Amino acid sequence: MVSRVIPVDDFDLVIFGGTGDLARRKILPGLYRRFCAGQMPETARIIGAARSEHDTEEFRQLVRDAIREFSTKNTCDEGQIGAFLERLDYVQVDARGSDGWDALKEMMRDGVVKAYYFSVAPSLFGDIAERLQSYGIADESARIVVEKPFGRDLDSAKKLNADLAKHFDETQIYRIDHYLGKETVQNLMAVRFGNILFEPLWNSQYVDHIQITVAETVGVGGRGEYYDRSGAMRDMVQNHLMQLLCLIAMEPPSRFDPDAVRDEKLKVIRALEPVDHHSIVRGQYEATATEPSYREDAGDPRSTTESFIALRCMISNWRWAGTPFFLRTGKKLKARTSEIAVMFKDAPHSIFGEEAGRHANVLSIRLQPNEGMTLKVTIKEPGPGGMRLVDVPLDMSFAEALGDDAEEITDAYERLIMDVIRGNQTLFMRGDEVEAAWAWTDPLIESWEKRGDMPKAYEAYSSGPEEAAMMLHREGRRWREIKE
């Protein structure tokens, strides 16, 4: 199976924060792989912009080192790396001053797609947007890409949206969430809306509950100070898990169109019921013999910030009334995995008797690692001795299904950047969507802050606090095991 590469229009892409960690780890290696795939026009250009005192050759060397360190592809030789680096320029700019902006304007070409990637702190978004307009660098066809966090509460999100809206139309703003660029997330929409098999069962009549898990084995480490100001709720639930919830729960859009898809996602967020404190479990990882605790990583021995959170959510609409959605995410858990599990109800009546046991179908969508999908079905156990039922998986991992082509699965950032150049906003969040997510999240945070709730301690490299397991046990359910 050979994937079809669709070229994009000629473009100038400016990466503000071009020497930063995200640019080195993801953005620039991703663009390099798109170049290797033949998707980048011959005259396309990438311009790094930052405060650092570099010339173009020094920037190119930085990018060469980043490609060698972070690109997993082995399809490009040194000659191709050199050809890619020829596309790169660099300009030193002051985001809050006047230095460098005239030089950047002189670099930009007419008649090509102009895109500006804000790989910088959100506090600089408004300053950069204002200077792009005041110096005449961006026109009404330009596109800007902004990274999360999109505020830390509803008020700051509204201010951030307003700052951007002063200079750019909503159709020009691309709020990036890399989870939406993952191959399996997009396949979720294909499975739901491209197969008659699933859609009739995708409702509260047949689905018992849905679990969404994003587990990490790493702690907060060097991000401790930043993370302690946000926590798992702001860092993961309000954006990544919320987006996965929307895609799994939304109604079929009328067409695969950016606003049609985002309209349906917004309806899901607005239909979320408030969550009471009995349906929230927050946790902090403890120290091991060789590794520090969360509070030690955060540098605050009295921190009440959560490194783990589990929620029981309900959606008030006809499709999902009565079906709980369980969300959990945490640091220093037993395995690195991201999974959506649709847990179907038991058959209403078993003709095989009690000795056959109770069995239910499960559709598991794995986002990482080993991207793929598994449908657990019930069959007869082979051999004589009566009707003994067992559950077996119908497994589709990309590595097995695509063979050698699995190596060519596009990284999320690669896909999303190319969508920016194409002008396709389907996989990007709209401003009202961001604000609706904060409007639901803020009261949850305020409620535990007012009560003075302390996060529950949990053992590092476990499944999280025991209280999270009890939350499901109280209603006769259990979390799926966290495993690679």
Image (cartoon, rainbow, N blue to C red):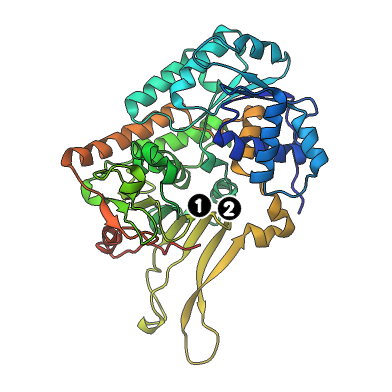
Q: How many labels does the image show?
A: 2
The percent coordinates of residue 67 (x first, y second) are 68, 41
Helix, strand or loop at label 1? It is helix
Residue 216 lies, with reference to residue 136, above or below; the image says below
Residue at the location (42% across, 53% down)? 213
Residue on which disc 1 sits: 199
* Quarter where residue 417 is shown: top right
In contact (CB < 8 Å): disc 2 and disc 1: yes
The percent coordinates of residue 172 (x first, y second) are 56, 21
Give the crowd class for mark 1: few <14, some 14-19, many >=20 residues within 10 Å: some
The percent coordinates of residue 58 (x first, y second) are 69, 28
- Taking depth in this image into account, of 14 and 254 the one nearest to the observer is 14
Residue 195 numbered mark, or none: 2
- The type of residue carrying mark 1 is Glu
Residue 429 lies, with reference to residue 222, above or below; the image says above
Please state if 296 lies on the left or on the right of 432 as rendered.
left
- The type of residue carrying mark 2 is Asn
Furthest-left residue in this view: 451
